[in-house]
Amino acid sequence: MSQQTLPTRTASGNARPGAPAREAPPHRPGLALAIVLTCQLMLILDATVMNVALPRIQSDLGFTAASLSWVMTAYSLTFGGLLLLGGRIGDIFGRRRAFVAGVALFTVASLVGGFATSATWLIAARLAQGVGAALAGPNTIALVTTTFTETKARIRALSLLSGIASAGFAIGLILGGILTQAASWRWVLFVNVPFGIAAVLLAPRFVREPERHPARLDIPGALTATAGVAALVAGFTRAAEEGWSDPWTATLLGGGVLLVAGFLAIEARTRQPMLPLRLFADRNRAAAYAIFLLGPAAMMSMFFFLTQFLQDLRGFDALRTGVAFLPMAGAMFVLTRAMPRILPKFGPRRLALTGIPVMIAGLLWTTQLTASTAYFPGVFGPMLLMGLGMGLGFVPLTPTIMANVPARDAGAAGGAMQTMQQTGASLGLAVLVTVFGTASRHAASSGSSTLDATIHGMTTAFTVAAGFAAIALLVATTFRKR
């Protein structure tokens, strides 16, 4: 009797006749969510985890003061520039496959970077980490969306994902301080390795592969989007280092604007776009995207300048600096846990219109910093307000963006969201550092001491950050009422 070949069932339940039978992973949504959330936290941590380690990295590897910023920028440049491409690759070739490949590359790059003996070596590893993160990141969101199809369960899972994405910046500073103080800055990279290996081994066993959506990869869109975002990030970073009058600054920013405009024109005309512009047709989703751009631009002022304030002006070591951010991370964690209950009751509009003003209040409080400001309440208070404001204003945005997204566009929608977040953080920080430099130089030229000039530069940057948050508040008023 001849042996028959049974059709294979995909994760979506579709059969592929003639293919060998393959058993689908067991349906363990809780374990699948834990794997995805752990990886998402790992990717976000690396945007800030090295901040408090930078002084030791500079002395060990011989970075100049100007080149040291590239330890952070190299990661954000490739992460932010390639996110849209990473999301679309997952839609076409398989989200779990793209997720696993991205985590594997990120893990190997972390291991290699931990052994760096030169500045060039470390920057190259950070670039590779960013590529891996861009491939894995948007597919974490798509995998959560397709794993949890019931409304309440999806809101809970996406709220946890959003909370981790936002709190990860603060947790990165805490973890970076602990590892740098207790061991070495190298462990800031090595710590990724066991978690990455576990994810690569466990994801194929417990995370189901959603149905693929065969399509042609939008190569012109991918090239213009990646080059445009990279040019903008590089331009603003150079502006922070060299000033706005630098010819390369103007060239990079002008080229970035033209490339982004070209990308939008391509997406409007191509039949299979990398970023379907129909995603912006929903008013709530479009507003959430805009807030995801503006919010991190304001938020990075806290992470960057308060780290400098605590270490350079108040004499905190790396460990104390990291632990100092616990109020922000703790407030966000509490609200993340509560979000599945309060989001359906109040909706994103009310929560954003409540949370963003709290965030603005925290930023305005930091404009009152002086050289003698103590941690409590002068730093603790703004951090607590910032954590509460971000938790209320930003955690609801991920469920809002992913609500009613067609399955074929889940990766693109998640990629666009993370592109907004990473681009907003990178561009916002570059703008704020430029504002800080300009204000502090002006104060010094007017006769202020170095200390007073530094404080004036920081408080001016916090004022501009509060302006970013105020614009986000205006955008939040456009949410549909529920």
Image: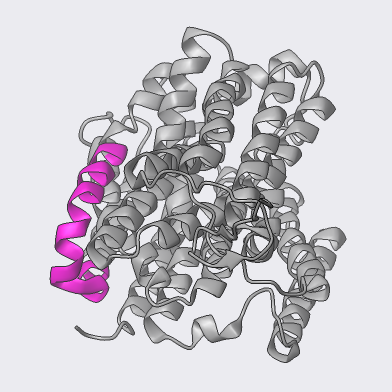
Position of residue 30 relative to residue 10, above or below, is: above
> Which of the 4 quarters of the picture holds residue 62?
top right
Residue 121 visible in the snapshot: yes
- Residue at x-position 69% and y-position 79%: 273
Which residue is at the far bottom? Answer: 269
Quadrant holding the C terminus: bottom left
Nearer to us in this view, 331 or 482: 482
Measured from the top left, where is residue 74 in percent x and y? Answer: 72, 42
Measured from the top left, where is residue 436 in percent x and y? Answer: 55, 49
Measured from the top left, where is residue 221 in percent x and y? Answer: 77, 74
Nearer to us in this view, 66 or 179: 179
Position of residue 429 relative to residue 420, above or below, is: above
Q: Is residue 248 left or right of residue 40?
A: right
> Which of the 4 quarters of the picture holds residue 67?
top right
How does the figure colour the protein chain or chains?
one colour
- Residue at x-position 57% and y-position 31%: 201
Position of residue 330 relative to residue 406, above or below, is: above
- Residue at x-position 41% and y-position 27%: 174
Q: Which residues are magenta?
A: 328-353
Nearer to us in this view, 122 or 298: 122
Q: Is residue 327 left or right of residue 203?
A: left
Which residue is at the far top? Answer: 183
- Residue at x-position 66% and y-position 44%: 102
Which residue is at the far front? Answer: 1
Q: Is residue 350 magenta?
A: yes
Q: Is residue 398 magenta?
A: no
Nearer to us in this view, 310 or 233: 233
The overriding secondary structure of the stretch rendered in magenta is helix
> Which of the 4 quarters of the picture holds residue 115?
top right
Q: Is residue 92 left or right of residue 454?
A: right
Measured from the top left, where is residue 33 in percent x and y? Answer: 38, 45
